[in-house]
Image: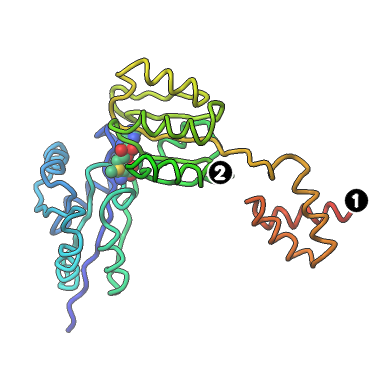
Amino acid sequence: MSMQTGRLYIVATPIGNLGDITRRAVEVLKRVDLIAAEDTRHTAGLLSHLGIDARTLSFHEHNEQQRSQQLVELLLAGKEIALVSDAGTPLICDPGYRIVSACRERGIDVVPIPGASAVISALSASGLPTDRFLFEGFLPRTQAKRRKRLQQLSDFPSTLVFYESSHRILHSLEDMLTQFGKDRRVVIARELTKQYETMIDQPLGRLLQTMAADTNQQRGEFVVMVAAGESPVMEKGFIDGVLQVLVEEMPPNQAARIAARISGQPKRELYQLLLKLKEK
Ligand code: SAM
């Protein structure tokens, strides 16, 4: 008789307020044989708050490869394992990618236990368009690389979302100013779910002044959300013109596809627009 393979649970934990732990998370953390934690001491605090006495094992960026192999062996031997990070959802700018892909390759079940994540919490309260967004995570540490990346993103036609720490928040905002200009709308979510939770929604130039003038505003953890850039090709009427020219030269489907690549708008919408333009 073959032994049943265990499951790997990816368990979200709070991003500040411990009240945000979910019932399922508690139930799974109680039940598993082992909890793989980014920082076992940090997780011990959460577990003691929840009254859970569990076995933990460190799982961080420096031992992820070796630990993944070890944990896969345990899972194949039938153990149930939970993966947690210090805050929020594992794998979202946190370790875990290696073990999840290793489990998928070996046919081991990976079960998400959803909960808090700073990116989704921040976006949901930002007032910026959320129908599409680009989650960029952390920007590069060096200024040259950071500016280059920001320049590449400058005209991206969706809300941009960045994670940032207190060490680099001002530097990143200064670099954004050089690449996006002072009038770009930016919303900053600081210390979400914690005592000093703050949201600031201002044009970039003013926002930088606000943050620079008050060192308290530079403390803690940040999600920086930037309104989509208005690229010149997106100006009203321009894309209609592009479509009209293209459709004279090629089939509508191809015209819509090329216009979508130029404008960043969904092909489906442009195809509909083409049909309307043809009716006129
Ligand atoms: N896995 C986490 C998640 O699901 O959001 C993110 C971990 S990442 C190492 C840490 C970064 O997430 C911080 O530097 C900050 O940008 C963001 N973050 C985490 N908690 C936050 C909070 N309470 N308020 C604002 N940003 C937060």
Horizontal side of residue 231 vs 161, given as left or right: right
At x 34%, y 36%, the residue is 164
Earlier sequence position, callout 2 versus callout 1: 2
Give the quadrant of residue 266: bottom right
Give the quadrant of residue 21: top left
Q: Nearer the viewer, residue 99 or 233?
A: 233
Q: Secondary structure at mark 2?
A: loop
Mark 2 vs ligand 1: CB below 8 Å: no
| Residue 1 position within the rendered picture, expressed as x and y whole percent measured from the top left | 17, 84
The answer to whether one can see residue 116 in this image is: no
From the image, tell me which residue sits under label 2.
158
Kindly identify which numbered label has been placed on residue 19: none
The answer to whether one can see residue 179 in this image is: yes
Q: Nearer the viewer, residue 1 or 136?
A: 136
Image vertical order of residue 205 relative to residue 32, above or below: above
Horizontal side of residue 242 vs 44, given as left or right: right
Horizontal side of residue 179 vs 196, given as left or right: right
Give the colour scheme of this rendering.
rainbow
| Residue 243 position within the rendered picture, expressed as x and y whole percent measured from the top left | 78, 55
Q: Secondary structure at mark 1?
A: loop
Quarter of image, ligand 1: top left
Task: Please rate how many residues cluster around mark 1, counting C-alpha atoms within 10 Å: few if below 14, some from 14 to 19, many from 20.
Answer: few
Kindly identify which numbered label has been placed on residue 280: 1
